Image (spheres, grey):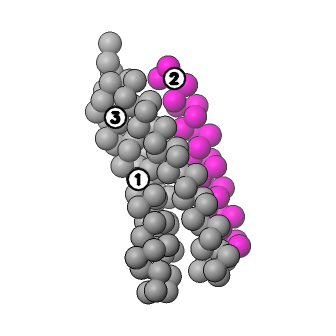
Amino acid sequence: MNKKHNFRNLKIWQKALNIAFVVSDKIENFPSKEQYSLTSQISRCSVSIPSNIAEGSARSEKSFIHFIDIAMGSSYELNMQLLIAQHKNYITIKELQELECQIEEWQRMTAGFQKTLQ
């Protein structure tokens, strides 16, 4: 049986959306020269995480697992992009560490959730 999930009720979606909101607020302060490069890349991968959960929730379990895999990949990409942002002093080490903690918590939650689908 293919069970559909209401993505709004999923804790992994709620946490992913919160991360996207926090990241969105942080990148508002990035230099305008980064608008079409690092800022855009960070925005796209942070929004991709909750978006893929939402899209996958309407699909079959097998497809949902695939969409969660994509979201997981985006979370690692986001982490990498934030390392560059910190290197360029667009965010502080403390901000990076706080975001990394949130991302890692999301990754653990999501891995656990994904196991329940298999």
- The quadrant holding residue 35 is bottom left
Measuring from the top left, give residue 9's x and y in whole percent: 38, 39
Q: Residues under labels 1 and 2: Cα distance?
A: 22 Å
Measuring from the top left, give residue 106's x and y in whole percent: 57, 46
Q: Residue placed farthest to the left in the image?
A: 58
Q: Which residue is mark 1?
A: 48
Tag on residue 73?
Answer: none
What segment carries the magenta color?
A: 93-118
Tag on residue 57?
Answer: 3
Q: Residue placed farthest to the bottom in the image?
A: 32
Q: Is any part of residue 76 visible from this angle?
A: yes
- The quadrant holding residue 32 is bottom left
Q: Residue placed farthest to the front in the image?
A: 37
Residue kind at label 2, given as amino acid type? Thr
Q: Residues under labels 1 and 3: Cα distance?
A: 14 Å
Q: Residues under labels 3 and 2: Cα distance?
A: 14 Å
Q: Is any part of residue 15 visible from this angle?
A: no
Q: In the picture shown, does residue 4 fall above or below 89?
A: above
The answer to whether residue 113 is left or right of residue 47 is: right
The answer to whether residue 94 is left or right of residue 69 is: right
Q: In the picture shown, does residue 87 fall above or below 61?
A: below
Q: Which residue is mark 2?
A: 116
Queried whether the magenta region covers residue 115, the answer comes back as yes
